[in-house]
Image (cartoon, grey):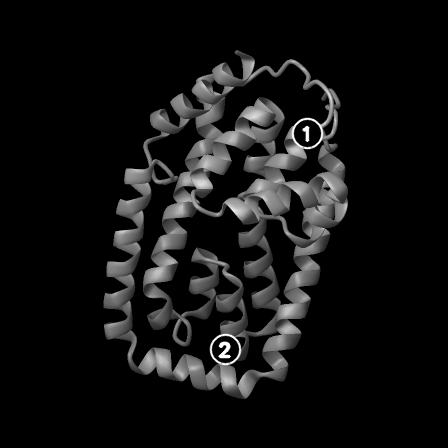
Amino acid sequence: MDEAPTHGHGAQPVRRPPSRRVLALVLVPIVVMTALAYVGDIAAAGLVERHPLWLIALNTRKRYLALVVPHTDALSFYVVGTLRQLLSDPFFYLIGIWYGDAGVRWLERKLGDGGLLVTWMERGFMKAAWPMVALFPNSLICMLAGASGMPAWLFLLLNVGGTVVSMVVLRAFGDVFSSPLAAVTHFLDHYRWPIIAVSAVLVGINVVLNRRKGTSELESISSLERELEEAADDDAG
């Protein structure tokens, strides 16, 4: 795999996007995991005490990981939480490899209104790529790693190592504050049906608004393919 210069510095190498079939194999898991994360947001109140591992298998927001600590054994927590967090990262890394800056710009549009956060992450990555991949391995950082030409072995080492360390910290936090966290989860479970209903409405509104703004990842695979191809054409132009 050819090395690329660091994102934002110098000319980018000629990118060779994959075939539509190969790209679909990367986009399908991203869409599926996005949909599952929405399901987790909706059902969190009903799962956090009764089926905590299902919750973090659906959605690994840090607050969910902390809340399930009192209701999970350490091994299950580490295995499920770590694997779920790592699942989508290689796919965004590959899009960065294939599309470079064009892929990054595409993802920025998908992230919508988080302009300041996106700018901070990009500047942070240009100054300290390794710590950013280890500490903040979100979709944008993973795509920047691919676009910058970071070797796959280094990306995986930093990504996996940083994720495991964050899981250890979250587990320790959950153990220290197990009593107040258990009280929160008991409240959520007791009022789970009203909370689930409100969550479903809020998630539904969020999905509709994002689709209208063109920032939703829950689009058809063909639409996502077309957006990436248009971004690549614009970048080449």
Q: Which residue is drawn at 33% across and 44% down?
A: 210
Q: Name the residue under label 2.
A: 71
Residue 26: x percent and y percent? 49, 32
Q: Between residues 66 and 7, which one lies in front from this camera angle?
A: 7
Residue 83: x percent and y percent? 57, 53
Query: SS class of the residue under badge 1?
Result: loop
Residue 177: x percent and y percent? 58, 83
Q: Of the residues under marks 2 and 1, which one precedes in the sequence?
A: 1
Give amino acid for label 2: His
Q: Which residue is drawn at 56% across and 84% down?
A: 178
Q: Mark 1 points at which residue?
A: 8
Q: Which residue is drawn at 57% across and 41% down?
A: 140
Query: SS class of the residue under badge 2?
Result: helix
Q: Which residue is drawn at 28% across and 80% down?
A: 191
Comparing labels 2 and 1, the label whose residue is closer to the camera = 1
Q: Between residues 202 and 197, which one lies in front from this camera angle?
A: 202
Q: Which residue lies furthest to the front in this view?
A: 116
Give amino acid for label 1: Gly
Q: Residue furthest top?
A: 237
Q: Between residues 119 and 61, which one lies in front from this camera angle?
A: 119
Count residues near mark 2 (Cα–Cα under 10 Å), then give few for <14, some for 14-19, many for 20+: some
Left/right placement of residue 69 relative to residue 129 reads left
Task: Tally the marks.
Answer: 2
**Mark sitting on residue 81:** none
**167 above or below 183?**
above
Alpha carbon separation for disc pair 2 and 1: 45 Å
